[in-house]
Image (cartoon, rainbow, N blue to C red):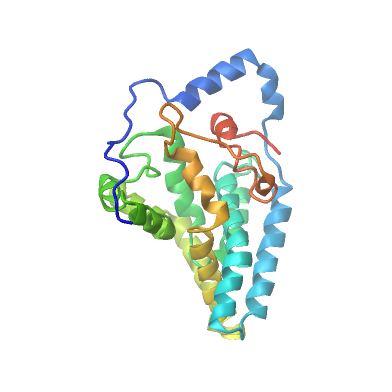
Amino acid sequence: MGQYITTHDFYHSYTDEPHATRRKEMLKKYPEIKQLMGHNWRMAIQVVISVFIQIIVAILVRDSSWLKLIFIAYVIGGTINHTLSLALHELTHNLAFGHARPYCNRLLGFFANLPLGVPASITFKKYHLDHHRFQGDEIYDTDIPTRFEVFLFSSRIGKFFFLLLMPFIYTLRPVFVFPKPIHILEIINLIITIIFNGIMFYFFGYKTTLYFILSTLLGLSIHPISGHFIAEHYVFNEGYETYSYYGPLNAITYNVGYHNERKKIIELIY
């Protein structure tokens, strides 16, 4: 169970970042692709519906047993909160209201963040954009596991715990690898989250707040939708770093499965 299945170091490449190079080639060869680029305000509708469903479910389970609460938090809450976290990704790139209205995207991000239980919208943006600018850089791309993580989680059981603890690892890694100053919008995000959690706690009890947090932790760890974390940046066949998923879950996850395609042209609308 604890057998180590690989002794390889990271894959090192001294070529150009492949997505950026391929993007230039594609746009030069097929300029009509630009007609498919833009933003889609309709994603705000899905965000609003998702948030209100989560609030309603949280209220309905406030008197549930622990087993039922955890089950619903995994099946329903985990699915919805994962899609909301993906909405934060889209909003990081201003894909709801466009680059001309950045604060409209930030405001929708605050709203999408409400059922997550923890402030994430602005902090995610602060680090995620570096993932695109410096993809593959061991320091600046904080999506890359640290060497300590490689040492700690290289066994089969270790990889299971790596997935199980993904929400904590993904959150804490940037703080240790490439810490940045706190932004005023992060403080606002924190205040909004505390106020919302406080309101839910005061009127409906502590299980509503716990439901939100459990939904986030379970939805971003061992959950079917979390498969995209593995597909996006882990090598299974040497020479192919990223993979795409073309199944039905794309309908509720803002086409996150189309990773190869959108990594090259993030502005593709759907």
- Is residue 190 in view from this perspective? yes
Q: Among all residues in the image, which is located at the extreme top?
A: 29
In the displayed structure image, the side of residue 2 where residue 210 appears, left or right: right
User: Can you give x and y, in whole percent of width and height, for residue 232 in the image?
Assistant: 49, 40
Q: Is residue 164 left or right of residue 79?
A: left
Residue 85 visible in image: no
Q: Residue at x 31, y 48 (%)?
A: 154
Question: Which is more toward the observer, 94 or 161?
Answer: 161
x and y percent of residue 109 in the render? 58, 55
Res 30 → quadrant: top right
Q: Percent x, y for residue 264?
A: 55, 29
Q: Is residue 12 above or below residue 254?
A: above
- Which residue does the image show at 71% across and 39% down from the upper left? 270
> Which residue shows up at 65% across the image and 46% down it?
254
Q: Determine the image quadrant of residue 38.
A: top right
Nearest the eye: 21 or 110: 21
- Specify the quadrant that holds the N terminus: bottom left
